[in-house]
Amino acid sequence: MNEQKNILFSEYDMDGLSLRNRVVMAPMTRNFSPNGVPKDYAPTYYARRAQGGVGLIITEGVEVSHHAASGYPNCPNLESNDAKKMWEKVVNEVHENNSSIFCQLWHVGGIRKPGMPPNPEVPGFTPSGYVRPGKKVAHEMSHEEIQELINIYSEDTKVCEELGFDGVEIHGAHGYLIDQFFWDQINHRDDEYGGTIENRSRFASEILQAAKSNTSENFKVGIRISQWKQQDYDAKIASEPHELNEFFQILKSAGADFVHCSNRRFWEGEFEPKGLNLAGIAKEATGLPTISVGSVGLDKDFIKLYAGDHKTQTVDLKTLHEKLNKSEFDLIAVGRALLSDPDWANKVQDGLEDQIIPFDRSFVENYI
Ligand SMILES: Cc1cc2nc3c(=O)[nH]c(=O)nc-3n(C[C@H](O)[C@H](O)[C@H](O)COP(=O)(O)O)c2cc1C
C-alpha cells in the first residue's frame, strides 16, 4: 500500500472518539421506516457497512420529535418504543463491528408539502413563510415555536445518547429548516433570528448549545451545512470569505464538535477552482474536525440521480488522497458508493478498486 492510502486508512482521534480510519458513511434517507420505525433489516444494513470497513456511520436523516418535522414517506424517528429499540439494535450492531455511529437529526421545515399524511393539516414550518424566494406559502414560526424546537432538538439528542449513539449530526444543510434560517433570501425575520449572519445562525447555535449542555462532555454534537440548497444550487449562506469565516466561527463558539460540509463534488474549491473546498475553509477557520463529501469514487454527482442520469462509473481516488495528505479536511464521507457496495472501504484499502460494484438507482430502491 502506498503512503497516500495510509492517510485514508489511518486512525483519527475526534477529541477522544477514536475512529479506525477516515471513511464516513454519508447520511442517506432510505424511506424504509413505516410509522417512523426502522425495518428489521436496518441493523444488518448498517452493520454491513461497518463490516465493510467504514470508520464512522452517520445515519439517514431521523426526524426530530415535532409534528411538522416530516416531509417524505416512511422516514424514521425516535418517538415510539419500537423505533428506539430498533435504533438501539443498529447502534449495537455497528459497535460490535468496530465502527462509531452518529444519528442525523432532521427537520424539513418548509419542504413539507401541505396535506402530507398522517397530519395533513400541519403546515411546513419556516423562518418567514417562504420555502424559496417569491411567494409566501408556509407557516412563519413564532418566537415560542423556535424555543420549543430548540428544546426538542436538545431532548432528542439526549435520547440518542441514551440509545448508545456516539454523537448526533444536526442537519443544517440542503435547504431544510435550519438552512432556511441561514439563507438570507428566505429568512426575512426582523427579530434576533434574522438579518445578520450572526442572527441567521442563532437558531442553529442555540440548538447546538442546548444539545451540548443536555449531554455528557464526550458525546459529540456537530452540524452538517451546505452552501447549496435543493431550491437553488447556486444559492449561498455566505459568498464572501470573511462572512464564511464568521459563520464557521459562530458554529464553533456554539460548541460544535465537528462540521460536515456538504459539496456535490469534493474536489471543487469554494472560492477558486484549485483553492480549499468548503470543509477546508471550515477547518482553516476553526481548527475543528471537518468532514468533506461529494462524488467520491464516482464520475457523476448525486443530483444526476434525480435527473434521470443515475448510472455511474468508478473513478480513482488520487485527488482524495492528495487532499487528505495536505490535511485539507480530516474525514471523507461516501454516499452512493456505499449503497451499491457495502465493502467499498475494504476494497479500496486492499487495492481492489476494480471490483467495486458501480452505483445506479436500483441501489436506492433496494436495501442491501
Ligand atoms: C439516496 C440518498 C439519500 C440522501 N439522504 C440524505 C439525508 O438524509 N441527509 C443528508 O444530509 N444528505 C442526504 N443525502 C446526501 C448525501 O449525504 C451525500 O451528501 C450525497 O449523496 C453526495 O455524496 P455521494 O456523491 O458520495 O453520493 C442523500 C443522498 C442520497 C443519494
Image (spheres, rainbow, N blue to C red):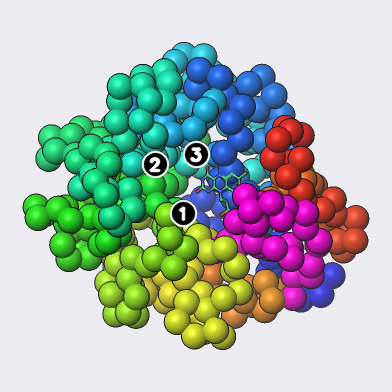
Assess mark 3: CB under 8 A from ligand 1?
A: yes
Mark closer to the chain start, 3 or 1 = 3
Judging by the rendered image, the residue that carries numbered circle 2 is: 111
Q: Nearer the viewer, mark 3 or mark 1?
A: 1
| Residue 120 percent across, percent down from the top left | 36, 21
Tell me how many marks there are.
3
Residue 230 got which mark? 1
Question: Residue at left 42%, top 54%?
Answer: 231
Left/right of residue 343 with respect to residue 29 in the rendered view: right
Q: Is residue 2 left or right of residue 176?
A: right
* 3 vs 2, front mark: 2
Dot 1: element: loop
Task: Single out the residue that lies furthest toward the top.
Answer: 81
Magenta region, residue range: 292-318
Kindly identify the residue that appears in the image at 23 percent across and 37 percent down: 139
Q: Which residue is mark 3?
A: 61
Q: Is residue 236 magenta?
A: no
Secondary structure beneath disc 2? helix
Residue 306 among magenta residues: yes
> Magenta stretch mostly in which secondary structure?
loop
| Labels 2 & 1 near each other (Cβ < 8 A) | yes
Position of 215 relative to 172 (above/below): above
